[in-house]
Image (spheres, rainbow, N blue to C red):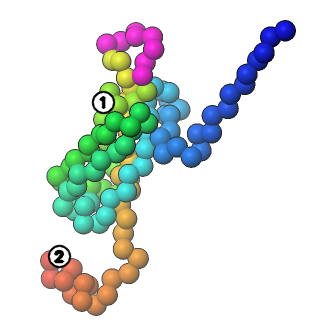
């Protein structure tokens, strides 16, 4: 007789998700601090195959802003286009402080008009 294997993949623990609109594209959430959101940042994302993707931005980042990194998605097996990989969409989630003491509040008020 035949031996049939059924493999299940638990994607719930992965930080990468396939996009429903195009499964060649991936999406991931990346957290930035308020300081990084205002002044810029450089983050390193460890991809599924362990290569490192550098995400760098020098301007202001809005909460839930999405950045597209071309060619960092899933491999495309049937090359209908010139692209060999889909894209990676990174959603920037800004971490706001849960509290601000009086000293920091005074500093912030002096910076913002």
The answer to if 66 sits in the magenta stretch is no
Q: Find residue 56 and report its horizontal and vertical position in percent.
A: 22, 47
What residue is rendered at 37% in x and 57% in y? 31
Give left or right: position of 7 versus 86.
Answer: right
Q: Disc 1 on helix, strand or loop? A: loop
Residue under pointer 1? 70
The magenta region covers 75-82
Residue 78 visible in the snapshot: yes
What residue is rendered at 76% in x and 17% in y? 4
Q: CA distance from mark 1 to mark 2?
A: 36 Å
Q: Disc 2 on helix, strand or loop? A: loop
Badge number at residue 112? 2
Give left or right: position of 32 versus 19.
Answer: left
Residue 66 visible in the snapshot: no
Q: Find residue 66 and report its horizontal and vertical position in percent.
A: 35, 45
Q: Find residue 25 and report its horizontal and vertical position in percent.
A: 43, 30
Check the image and report above or below for 79 versus 11: above
Nearer the observer: mark 1 or 2; the answer is 1
Quadrant of the frame with the N terminus = top right
What residue is rendered at 73% in x and 22% in y? 5
Q: Nearer the viewer, residue 24 or 13?
A: 13
Furthest residue toward right: 1
Give left or right: position of 41 versus 28.
Answer: left
Q: Find residue 106 and report its horizontal and vertical position in percent.
A: 21, 87
């Amino acid at each position: 007789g035949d031996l049939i294997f059924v493999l299940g993949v638990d994607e719930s623990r992965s930080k990468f998700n396939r996009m429903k609109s195009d499964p060649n594209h991936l999406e991931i959430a990346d957290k930035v601090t308020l300081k990084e959101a205002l002044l810029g940042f450089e983050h390193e994302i460890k991809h599924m195959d362990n290569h490192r993707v550098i995400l760098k931005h020098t301007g202001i980042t809005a909460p839930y802003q999405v950045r597209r990194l071309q060619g960092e998605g899933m491999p495309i097996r049937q090359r209908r286009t010139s692209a060999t990989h889909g894209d990676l969409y990174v959603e920037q989630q800004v971490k706001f402080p849960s509290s601000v003491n009086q000293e920091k509040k005074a500093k912030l008020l002096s910076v913002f008009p």
